[in-house]
Amino acid sequence: MNKKEVLEIRKQFTPENCAITRICGCYVDHEKEKKTELKKAFLSMPEEEAFKYFDIFKHTLSGTLGKNLMNMEFPTEQEMPGGTQEFLLKLRDSKLTDDLLVEEFYDKVIENYIYPENYYIILIHAVYDVPGKSSDGLEMFDASDTVYEHIMCSICPVNLTKAGLTYNAETNNIEDRIRDWFVELPVKGFLFPAFNDRASDLHGVLYYSKKPEELQPDFIENVLGSQIPLTAKDQKASFQTIISDTLGEDCDYEVVRNIHDNLNEMIEEAKETPEPLELGKPEMKNLLARSGASQEHLETFDEEFEEVVGEKQTLLAANIASRKTFQIETPDIVLKVNPERSDLVETREIDGRKCLVIPIDEHLEVNGIEVH
């Protein structure tokens, strides 16, 4: 799913556009016991309560693609009878009215979701009548020819409100605040099936994680059946490893600076496209060649990429680029440069030593003090 497709589904979580037919929920305590459950038609909810749920659902489709929101595909074995895709399809097709299926889903989550405190599992079913679009891109609400039927799960922590004092309007007194259990915004969730090319894609699922580095591998593997993706941090580390291993001793400052500049140029050129820029093996190899890597070094590149990332896997440009900082480190010095002016720093040999050379104009500050 790209940004536009995520936003299109997110826009349905309003009273005017609501396509949710049913909601189910299960409150789980710190001992993994089900304490209470919810099953009802969503439109039967009081308005104020529905608004709170809309906020939760919007947050389940929020964040950055490739970091908080990850497109995942089912491996072939999970699309066979008995696989996780079949189970999720049954859940969707039941419209959440099959109590046994819903209970089985809760059990799968409770078994595989690692969290030491209380939490609330929310599951919704929705049917979105996808509007057609004219040649100029305008929506034609009376020309729909596609129905996107889906389920979405949100997992929210439930914590005690903070202790403190409060004003009681009935008694006109400042009193001790009554602490109660509060459902917070979601930290994990998923949308199934994926909404690709404005239609259902049964081969994919969109996964949400509030903290990109905490993906819950057991949940992904056993509930969704998908391959665990590289986190944004792991993608950057993999990129750095590929560069270092491919270039070896010839990984000098000029080549690394060229890689930085060329990668950011690629991102800038692709910023208007809805899909995030991804670099597979051919794109990464081309980036290195453009940046000054020799043909001799590139002979080992394919092997390095497949070993570190995977033959058909990709890295998100936004996860591996440093657009906000250009940082140079020695054991004793950390130098931060405007990423758009990395050309100001160069390497030279002075008196037999390799040195970083930085031209100084009329303005120079040290610890906030202007010096001459």
Image (tube, rainbow, N blue to C red):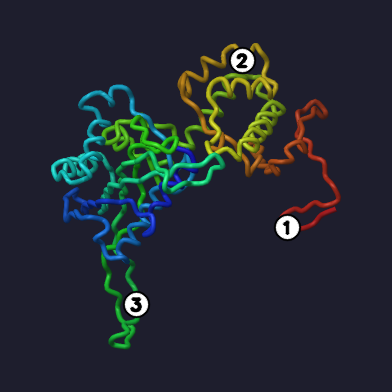
Q: Which residue is mark 1?
A: 368
Mark nearest the camera among 1 and 3 is 3
Instruction: Report whether 121 appears left or right of 133.
Output: left
Quadrant of the frame with the N terminus:
top left
Q: Which dot, 2 or 1, sits closer to the camera?
A: 2
Which corner quadrant of the image does residue 334 belong to? top right
Task: Please tell me which residue is depicted at 43% across the width and 41% down the height of the picture.
Answer: 69
For this rendering, which residue is in front, 110 or 139?
139
- The residue indicated by pointer 2 is 298
Q: Is residue 330 left or right of residue 198?
A: right
* Secondary element at tag 1: loop
Give percent across and percent down for residue 131.
Answer: 42, 45
Q: Residues within 10 Å of mark 2 (few under 14, many from 20)?
A: some
Q: Is residue 320 above or below residue 140?
A: above
SS assignment at label 3: strand
Which mark's residue is nearer the viewer, 3 or 2?
2
Residue at the (48%, 37%) spot, across then down: 232
Between residue 51 and residue 250, name the one nearer to us: 51
Which labelled disc corresponds to residue 327?
Answer: none
Q: Which residue is mark 3?
A: 165
Side (left or right) of 93 relative to 325: left
Residue visible at 34% across and 45% down in the picture: 189
